[in-house]
Image: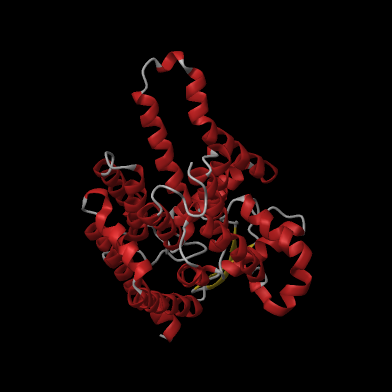
């Protein structure tokens, strides 16, 4: 067994679960006092105390190096999947109907469908159309990385519009957090996510913000967890309204963001076949028997335990029961807490590495708790709402 196989099968899952379960425990520890006083105090100290700042930055560097090292030797095939899907699409083939997408498995290269929604495919196809002939000979299957570097600039600008921190403290945190994801389409997800957060939470342009949340979820559908909890919160708000049946205009106003964003994603999917897109994204990505045809199910705690006791075939019902029980436990908590806890839960029960949540969850927690800790209600550099 070579070092890359050792890390992927043993060390990688171990460190992955230790890191994220530890972070979840820390969240419980910090998130116990009323109004999150410990978290607020931590942010204030982080801004004021340079020693604390440099200590945290050092820890982040260690995490960053681990993720980069794991990525380099785990030999992810996201770059191969994106490249083969884009090339097939530009050649006139439908990667949601034909097995044209290249995947690397222990038994060799196999071909399957594209596992990300059309907004992802179209974005990379446009970039490849204009720059692929120049970048592909230089960077091979990582031709899309320059696009991600370009996206860093507006992404950082959006962050500075939300969090009123000095640049010398916000920039290292931002770069260390996003750099490991420059080599996968998680960076595109983050870009859409930040736009959605800015529009939805800061500008209160709920419909347009939800559209970008859905676009983010179309790249990596982990962001869909946030949308689900938002939708659940909306339904609970509607349930509490009196004379609701007489006020359909109010109901329509509250539900419009979800209808419009769903319609946008449907329109993107129509040319490729909506049913074919759904099957390619959800069936082949989420159901372990189909997923194992083109990729390994490995990493998070639940799938590793089930593999150890030879019960992988029961993954879906067990994961479903765990999810339902968890949702019952957190049903009365604020939406923000539900999102954070469910994100951590997802990191340990999904059948694949959920590292995308590592960039959406910290940013979401950072914005929600960090901003109000020291801006007295103002959101970063923006005027009061």
- At 48% from the left and 54% from the top, the residue drawn is 380
Residue 252, given in percent of the width and then of the height, sits at 52, 25
Is 142 situated left or right of 326 in this image? right
Is 340 situated left or right of 160 in this image? left
Q: Is residue 96 visible?
A: no
Task: Locate the N terminus and report the quarter of the image it occupies.
Answer: bottom left
Q: Quadrant of residue 87?
A: bottom right
Q: Quadrant of residue 52?
A: bottom left
Residue 78, given in percent of the width and then of the height, sits at 56, 67
Of 81 and 153, the residue lying toward us: 153
Of 327 and 281, the residue lying toward us: 327
- At 42% from the left and 78% from the top, the residue drawn is 61
- At 30% from the left and 63% from the top, the residue drawn is 42
Residue 31, given in percent of the width and then of the height, sits at 25, 55
Q: Quadrant of residue 331?
A: top left
Residue 306, given in percent of the width and then of the height, sits at 30, 61
Q: Is residue 351 visible?
A: yes
Is 18 situated left or right of 365 in this image? left
- At 59% from the left and 65% from the top, the residue drawn is 152
């Amino acid at each position: 067994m070579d070092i890359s196989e050792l890390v992927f099968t043993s060390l990688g899952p171990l460190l992955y679960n230790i890191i994220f379960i530890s972070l979840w425990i820390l969240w419980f520890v910090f998130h116990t006092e009323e109004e999150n006083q410990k978290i607020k105090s931590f942010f204030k100290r982080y801004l004021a105390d340079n020693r604390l700042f440099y200590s945290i930055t050092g820890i982040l560097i260690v995490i960053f190096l681990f993720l980069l090292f794991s990525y380099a030797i785990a030999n992810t095939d996201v770059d191969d999947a994106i490249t083969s899907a884009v090339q097939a699409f530009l050649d006139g083939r439908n990667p949601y109907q034909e097995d044209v997408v290249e995947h690397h498995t222990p038994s060799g290269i196999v071909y399957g469908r594209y596992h990300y929604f059309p907004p992802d495919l179209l974005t990379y196809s446009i970039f490849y159309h204009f720059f692929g002939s120049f970048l592909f000979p230089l960077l091979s299957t990582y031709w899309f990385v320059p696009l991600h570097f370009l996206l860093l600039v507006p992404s950082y600008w959006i962050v500075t519009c939300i969090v009123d921190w000095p640049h010398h403290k916000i920039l290292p945190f931002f770069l260390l957090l996003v750099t490991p994801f420059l080599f996968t389409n998680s960076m595109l997800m983050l870009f859409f996510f930040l736009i959605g957060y800015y529009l939805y939470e800061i500008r209160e342009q709920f419909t347009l913000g939800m559209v970008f949340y859905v676009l983010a979820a179309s790249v990596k559908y982990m962001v869909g967890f946030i949308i689900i909890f938002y939708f659940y919160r909306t339904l609970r708000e509607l349930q509490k309204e009196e004379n609701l049946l007489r006020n359909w205009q109010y109901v329509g106003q509250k539900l419009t963001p979800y209808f419009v964003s769903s319609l946008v994603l449907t329109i993107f999917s129509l040319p490729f076949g909506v049913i074919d897109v759904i099957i390619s994204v959800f069936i082949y990505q989420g159901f372990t028997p189909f997923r194992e045809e083109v990729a390994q199910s490995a990493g998070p705690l639940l799938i590793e335990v089930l593999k150890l006791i030879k019960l992988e075939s029961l993954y879906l019902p067990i994961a479903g029961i765990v999810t339902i029980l968890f949702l019952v436990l957190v049903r009365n908590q604020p939406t923000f807490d539900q999102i954070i806890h469910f994100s951590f839960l997802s990191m340990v029960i999904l059948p694949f590495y959920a590292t995308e949540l590592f960039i959406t969850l910290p940013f979401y927690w950072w914005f929600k708790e960090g901003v109000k800790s020291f801006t007295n209600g103002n959101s970063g550099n923006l005027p009061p709402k």
